[in-house]
Amino acid sequence: MSSLYRKYRPNQFSELLGQDHIRSSISAMLATDQVGHAYLFSGPRGTGKTTLARLLARAVNCVGKKTKEEACGKCDICLEIQNGSSVDVIEIDAASNRGIDEIRDLREKIAFAPTRSRYKVYIIDEFHMLTREAFNAFLKTLEEPPAHVIFILATTELHKVPETIISRCLRYQFHRATLDKIITVLHEIAAKEGLKLDDSAAQVIAERADGSYRDALALLDNVSGQKNLTAESLRAAIGLPSAEVISQLLLAIESGGAKIVASLLKKFVDEGLDIGVLVREMADSCRQRIFDSATTDVAPSALLLEELLVALARARHSVDTTSLLSASLISAALKRETVKTASSDSTILATPPAASTITDLSEKETTTAPAVDTVSATPVKSNDSGAFWPNFLTSVHEKNHALYAVVSSAHFDGITDDKLNITVKFRFYSERLFERKNRDLIELLASEVAGRSLVLECLVKPDLDVGVNKEEDLLSTVIEVFEINE
């Protein structure tokens, strides 16, 4: 049985969805018989690049068409191309044929005329995967191709394709499918397949497809055994967390409820579900909040989205994804809990901080506060390191709340003539502090408070006692339970 995305793959230009700008341009070229020798199709996955390449190969070679724009779909040439058996239409996966030897082999074969068709068409998918040497070898062929050869290059990462090749191709950028168009397609195909798909289930599939028609149909195919599809049954079938769990986790992190986050994560993992999927859904929810927020402040959602994406990026290289992502989510909650506590602790802040929202870790100030005389405005004496630390913390808090949450957890070891010396308990705290934008801000503020140039010196000591109640140190607990390698 054929999969849905193969079964409903467009067979005519008119059936191609969402790419009207490309279809009209290529149709006009075919109508005037001005066929180019090289085409470059770029855009997100599942938007029709390979499909259009095959349609174009049929259109230039069809012997039974009544118009120049559309292939008949019935002649032997069309059927061979459609079935993938044409000797004159060669599809190459550059991901597995990416070396110079494969390109040299291609250069030798293109000299031979087509066997049955007018043109010999080479469709090279994932073109950006070629090696540098292979690109250079291919460039010579692209500059002086035989008249009977057409190249159609498809890529999802245009920035990896050399400009020398891009400039020699007719380039077309495919658009990501919109939610509304995917939902419409899902309802149409579900009706043809005898599936009852409610609007909420179609919305879940469309959001999960991330702009890809192919991914949307693959998901629908995955649950097509259920004749009555709702959002709840769909989420359960493909292992997606419920909207309630996502909402509870986001609220717990933003309110600094680290214990609640840990409890929700434990329950989720105990059910055998994929925490990577959970974090991606949380990131999608934050992204949607940002796009939907016309009047509300988007800074908290933007900061949390960044943290979630960084956690996912780190997890790709981790031997224990579940542990790392769990620690990252609880750490995010602990940071916000620390900020809330520090904001109400007058012994830490020399002056009350200006009302502010959580911002991303950047060097720019996002709030405008009235000018006040704070103790950080006057440089401390070179030997007065005791006054330095509270004044420095005040400056960091005023500039960047999220960075303050990490800095305030450090142990202050003093300042020397040219160094600010601190110690942290966790290695990833040190990595956060040494990110370029964070280190630049720390050293700038430290130099202003001390009245001289200081550079950051940070040590990591796992046994560091920073005065946190051991029962409340949830991050330490997670690291121990999940055996994260520090």
Image (spheres, grey):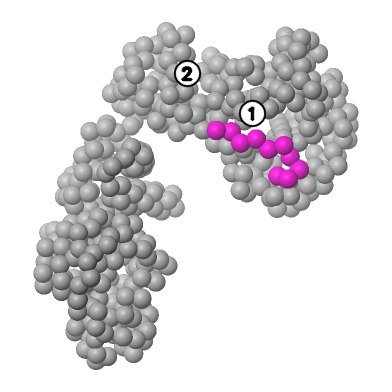
Where is the C terminus found, in terms of image quarters?
A: bottom left
Is residue 227 rendered to the left or right of residue 156?
left
**Rendering quarter of residue 97:** top right
Q: Are marks 1 and 2 in contact (CB under 8 Å)?
A: no
Res 185 label: 2
Residue most toward the front? 370
Question: Which residue is more in the foreground, 455 or 68?
Answer: 68
Calculate the distance from the C-alpha at mark 1 to the C-alpha at mark 2.
20 Å
Residue at x-position 11% and y-position 66%:
345
Q: Badge 2: how crowded within 10 Å, few (<14), some, or many (20+)?
A: some
**Rendering quarter of residue 199:** top left
As drawn, 360 above or below 248: below
As drawn, 365 above or below 391: above
- Mark 1 vs mark 2: in front: 1
As drawn, 371 above or below 211: below
Boundaries of the magenta span: 166-175
